[in-house]
Amino acid sequence: MRFPALFVNHGGGPLPLLGKQPSVIKHMKEIVSHHLPPRKPKAIVVLSAHYEADPVQITTSKTPPMLFDYHGFPPETYKYKYPAPGSPELANEIQRLFLCNNIDSEFNETRGFDHGVFIPLMVMYPGANIPV
């Protein structure tokens, strides 16, 4: 079975990780337990609504940094880490598929994991051992 494409509500900034949105945490955990195969995925592709570019940009870093794209939260929320590896090989495949479908794209080696990426993945795959 292939892994499905899913929409994952990531809540309001870091609020789920602060215990302020327990229903969002429950939602994220239920996605893994109810809607995904029991095996670990080979990689995770995330389309983030927190970054728009024309053409579409594809992260190619082997070690994407954290991007704290929220403001006014407690200091500890700016120290979160999600050290999952990037996958330049997968980025190449994504660009190839975009090209086959007439979608312009370019690589971005510096773009990191914004909170729309790292908040859900910290809950869903806390081991940070799957390429993103």
Image: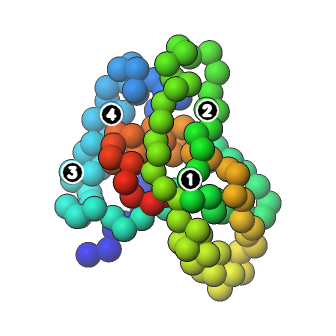
Distance from the alpha carbon under mark 2 to that under mark 3: 28 Å
| Amino acid at circle 2 | Phe
Distance from the alpha carbon under mark 1 to that under mark 2: 16 Å
Q: Could you say where residue 60 lies in the image, as x and y percent from the top left?
A: 63, 62
Distance from the alpha carbon under mark 3 to that under mark 1: 28 Å
Q: Residue furthest bottom?
A: 100
Compare marks 2 and 4 and give the one earlier in the sequence: 4
Q: Residue furthest right?
A: 54
Image quarter of residue 16: top left
Q: Which residue is mark 3?
A: 33
The residue mark sitting in front, 1 or 2, is 1
Distance from the alpha carbon under mark 4 to that under mark 3: 12 Å
Q: Could you say where residue 132 lies in the image, as x and y percent from the top left?
A: 48, 58
Does 98 sit left or right of 117 as displayed? right
Does 121 sit left or right of 64 as displayed? left
Q: Could you say where residue 111 lies in the image, as x and y percent from the top left?
A: 67, 50
Compare marks 1 and 4 and give the one earlier in the sequence: 4
Residue 70, placed above or below residue 72: below
Quadrant of the rendering where the N terminus is positioned: bottom left
Residue at 60% over, 44% down:
65
Nearer to the camera, 20 or 74: 74
Residue at 72% over, 59% down:
108
Image quarter of residue 70: top right
Q: Which residue is mark 2?
A: 68
The residue mark sitting in front, 2 or 4, is 2
Q: Which residue is mark 4?
A: 25
Instruction: Say few, some or many: other residues with alpha carbon within 10 Å of mark 1 (under 14 / 14 to 19 / 20 or more).
Output: some
Compare marks 4 and 3 and give the one earlier in the sequence: 4
The residue mark sitting in front, 2 or 3, is 2
Q: Could you say where residue 82 lies in the image, as x and y percent from the top left?
A: 46, 41
